[in-house]
Image (tube, rainbow, N blue to C red):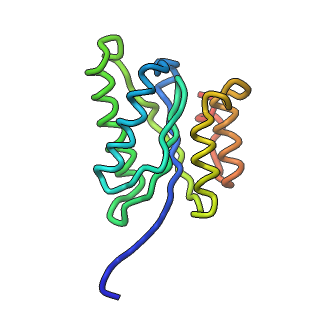
Amino acid sequence: MPQSLSRVLVHLVFSTKNREPVLSATLQAELHPYLAGILDRIDCPSLRTGGVEDHVHMLFGLSRTKTIADVVETVKTASSKWLKARDPRLAGFHWQAGYAAFSVSQSDAEKVVDYIAGQAEHHRKRTFQEEYRLLLAKYHVAFDEQYVWD
């Protein structure tokens, strides 16, 4: 086989520093496509990007030459710079240091796309911390309680 091929789907979640609700609906309307564009430029095709005031979700195909950590660093750095330049009120903006990344089977991709698309409705009933905890449990990820609620 003379070529290397892969299809690894990743659901990535990360929040604003201290989960500050600084991403207004207007800003999200520009930020989410910007995040998708970053992914596309680094050969990690975006399937869906969304979120609410204090966090984002992204479903993308992981490039066969990138690590998840590389992708997170690139996305957070570029989007943080963009946000700071976009609005002077965000001059001190930062993303939270951590993130969660989950593998998604191709057969579940559409469910995750719908889940990300429904974030605004979803968070009328559940906080980010509750959602995060449920995702960690669903994917059997061990975690340190202090970082979920910190």
Q: Is residue 1 above or below residue 107?
A: below
Residue at left offset 50%, top offset 59%: 9
User: Percent from the top left, x then y, of residue 32?
Assistant: 43, 34
User: Percent from the top left, x then y, of residue 62?
Assistant: 42, 59
Q: Is residue 64 left or right of residue 85?
A: right
Q: Is residue 31 above or below residue 7?
A: above
Residue at left offset 46%, top offset 31%: 96
Quadrant where the image shows the C terminus = top right
Q: Is residue 61 above or below residue 54?
A: below
User: Percent from the top left, x then y, of residue 11?
Assistant: 53, 50
Residue at left offset 30%, top offset 52%: 42
Count of picture labels: 0
Q: Most extreme residue toward the right, as rendered?
A: 125
Residue at left offset 37%, top offset 55%: 44
Dividing the picture into quadrants, the one containing residue 117 is top right
Quadrant where the image shows the N terminus = bottom left
